[in-house]
Image (tube, rainbow, N blue to C red):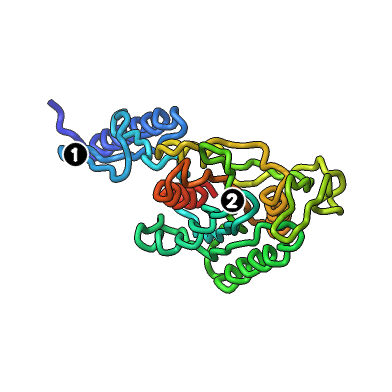
């Protein structure tokens, strides 16, 4: 046997490096075949590899394919989200509005329960169940929310202008409202005695058939809430009463300011009890933050 020279040894070492490099490239190529998963390339080791907060789906060579358990929360880290919430006082036919109770108790409730990382509960406002006569209070709440956000300008905030909660006394489940229309047709006078009929909410927007849609990811929000066991659906009709009136103003305001707005109808407490509704709203806040 001929002795191995330094040149031969270097050539073999170089070839071995090329083979290892080609194997790594092949593994990386295999790892890229299944989008929607994360991959970790690990060194050869006799010890098990622990991948926190993930589910190991398969192993290809040194590549572990993992699925994030928080997939519906998004692939990036949590945004810093401030959500301002509003509810309504009593109105004709509803002597006790569940949204007033929910919003008044929400800060205390989430203080005990806790909220997801990056999520802050902003203002909690109770509005009169009125259209034009309560517009000033609505805009004051929305503007004050922006001012609070701008005072924390160093934070990366995705701000929901207002999460509005309203009651549907005939409902059996929660309803996430996709849109509002530019029409006020009140079936009864509001709390200030106003009862418009086929009236444009914002005249500058033109016809009363014009609709504005939320920019919130309502399908993703629905999926998260259903996974938690809540009886909830998406609605395309917020009515033509005060809820639709407030929502239309809020959607327009949010669009102008580059923020978000969402309206959700809840049932009476006789249909879904108060504790369940409190849990729903807390989960709703987290679902909104997770999908911003």
Q: Residues within 10 Å of mark 1 (few under 14, many from 20)?
A: few
Where residue 45 appears, x then y in whole percent? 19, 39
Residue 94 got which mark? 2
Name the disc covering residue 48, or none: 1
Choose between 64 and 68: the one closer to the eye.
68
Q: Say whether disc 2 or disc 1 marks the residue closer to the N-terminus.
A: 1
Above or below residue 164? Residue 223 is: above
x 65%, y 64%: residue: 142
Quadrant hosting residue 162: bottom right
* Residue 211 circle label: none
Nearer to the camera, 153 or 197: 197
| 109 sits left or right of 102 in the view | left
| Residue at left offset 56%, top offset 40% | 175
* Residue 76 visible to the viewer: no
Residue 87, image quadrant: bottom right
Secondary structure beneath dot 1 equals: loop
- Location of residue 103 with respect to 68 vertically, above or below: below
- 124 over 33 or under it: above or below: below
Give how far across and how far down residue 206 sits, in percent.
Answer: 87, 47
Task: Measure how far apart labels 2 and 1 are at the Cα level.
Answer: 61 Å
Is label 2 in a helix, a strand or a loop?
Answer: loop
């Amino acid at each position: 046997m001929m002795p191995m020279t330094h040149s031969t040894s270097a050539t073999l070492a170089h070839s071995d490096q090329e083979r290892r490099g080609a194997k790594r490239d092949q593994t990386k190529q295999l790892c890229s075949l299944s989008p929607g998963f994360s991959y970790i390339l690990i060194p050869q080791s006799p010890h098990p590899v622990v991948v926190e907060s993930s589910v190991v789906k398969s192993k290809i060579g040194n590549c572990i394919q993992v699925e994030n358990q928080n997939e519906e929360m998004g692939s990036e880290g949590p945004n810093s989200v401030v959500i301002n919430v509003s509810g309504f006082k009593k109105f004709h036919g509803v002597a006790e509005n569940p949204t007033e109770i929910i919003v008044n108790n929400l800060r205390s409730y989430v203080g005990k329960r806790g909220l997801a990382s990056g999520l802050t509960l902003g203002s909690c406002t109770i509005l009169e169940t009125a259209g034009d006569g309560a517009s000033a209070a609505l805009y004051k709440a929305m503007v004050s929310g922006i001012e609070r956000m701008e005072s924390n300008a160093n934070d990366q905030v995705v701000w929901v202008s207002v999460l509005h909660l309203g009651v549907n006394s005939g409902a059996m489940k929660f309803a996430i409202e996709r849109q509002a229309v530019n029409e006020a047709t009140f079936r009864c006078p509001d709390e200030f005695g106003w009862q418009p009929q086929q009236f444009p909410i914002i005249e500058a927007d033109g016809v009363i058939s014009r609709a504005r849609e939320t920019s919130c990811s309502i399908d993703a929000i629905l999926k998260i809430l259903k996974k938690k066991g809540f009886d909830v659906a998406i609605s395309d009709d917020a009515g033509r009463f005060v809820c639709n009136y407030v929502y239309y103003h809020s959607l327009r305001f949010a669009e102008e300011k580059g923020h978000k707005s969402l309206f959700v109808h809840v049932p009476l407490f006789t249909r879904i009890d108060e504790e369940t509704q409190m849990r729903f709203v807390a989960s709703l806040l987290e679902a909104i933050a997770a999908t911003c």
